[in-house]
Image (tube, helix red, strand yellow):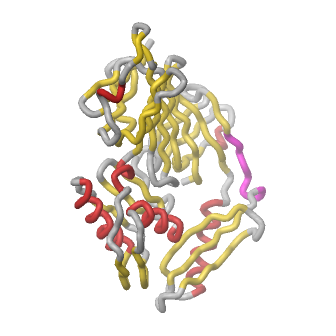
Amino acid sequence: MLAMNHRITVGTWRLGMIDSVKIHKSVETLSDTAIVVLPGTYINAGIDIESFIHTGDEVTIKLGYDDDLKTEFKGYLKSIQTDDGSITLECEDSLYLWRVPLDDIQLSNISLKALLQKVSSQVSATSGKIYNVVCDYDFNYEKFTFYKASAIDVLKQVQEETKANIYFAEDVLHIHAPYSQIRNAVPVVYDFAVNVEKSDLKYVKATDKNISVEVTCLMPDGENKTVQYGSPHGTTKHKTIAASDVASARTAAMSEFNLWCYDGYEGSITGWLEPYVEPTYKVMIRDAEYPMKTGTYYVVSTEVEFGSAGGVRKVTLGRRV
């Protein structure tokens, strides 16, 4: 038997009694979030929580079994809610500090990495936090205009236009092409007979998939061209690349289509706090009854729930890798 354990700090305070914790991480959203629910009273007296902790305080959440705790979340306290007889702490990762206005300016012929380095330098000047930018996404803007915009506004625009995975890992802003970054060399194994509590998976044949791939290409003359491949009425997957000509763009669209059209699982699995998994990890799904269905998949999101009922981790699968 393993004892569930936690260590949650907000500012200089460590939280003792908790009702529940919920943490959501995804490469498809700009921020990771955590919600911590505390009892609203202690020995029949209300708790004046705001005398001890405040919005903007740093938050660290470690969860696990016995003394083997993993850091599941690091960020900042975004809000404190005291309704319904409980105390709810809403937390957000480093995106919390990016709610700063930017100077109005127009930039020309700038790479995506240089653009975000410029934004991060303004955020650092305001927040006092130094942010590094790790960007291997090859994209250039002929013109980019800042007008009454915040740093978050810029990140949202970049994500919408490039379809890149944009996320924070503590004080590092990451920008990568979708599915290009895998952070664990050896896949984490989920075996239906060992460590899967429940699943919401569907095994789909490539021939049954209704998928379309849309590739937006930045051409040498600065013009954007869009090429589509696959079913015109299917679920559309987007990708942005730099291409020398339309033929190269069409080849890229066909390659991307083949990456999505495979025999494999779609959906999610739920296990416990161990093994530890994050978005950008790869996991192997193993089923002894159907060995032909064993495969390795990219993790796009995780959701951790921790409380009196136990601790579980829901892992949502992306494409097969």
> Is 193 drawn above or below residue 254 in the view shown?
above
Q: Quadrant of residue 56?
A: top left
> Is 116 drawn above or below residue 196 in the view shown?
below
Q: Position of residue 161 (x, y in %)?
A: 52, 71
* Magenta run includes residue 207: yes
> Is 151 drawn above or below residue 270 in the view shown?
below
Q: Position of residue 156 (x, y in %)?
A: 48, 63
Residue drawn at (35%, 78%) of the image:
105
Q: Is residue 295 left or right of residue 47?
A: right
Residue drawn at (39%, 21%) of the image:
65
Q: Is residue 294 left or right of residue 183?
A: right
What span is colored magenta in the figure?
Answer: 201-208
Q: Nearer the viewer, residue 180 or 74?
A: 74
Q: Position of residue 41 (x, y in %)?
A: 43, 15
| Numbered-mark total | 0
Q: Is residue 274 among what the camera can see? A: no
Q: Is residue 161 left or right of residue 42?
A: right
* Magenta run includes residue 278: no
**Placement of the C terminus among the 4 image quadrants:** bottom right
Q: Position of residue 229 (x, y in %)?
A: 68, 73
Q: Is residue 309 among what the camera can see? A: yes
Q: Nearer the viewer, residue 43 or 203?
A: 43
**Placement of the N terminus among the 4 image quadrants:** top left
Q: Quick one: which residue is furthest to the top in this view?
A: 43
Q: Nearer the viewer, residue 321 or 227?
A: 227
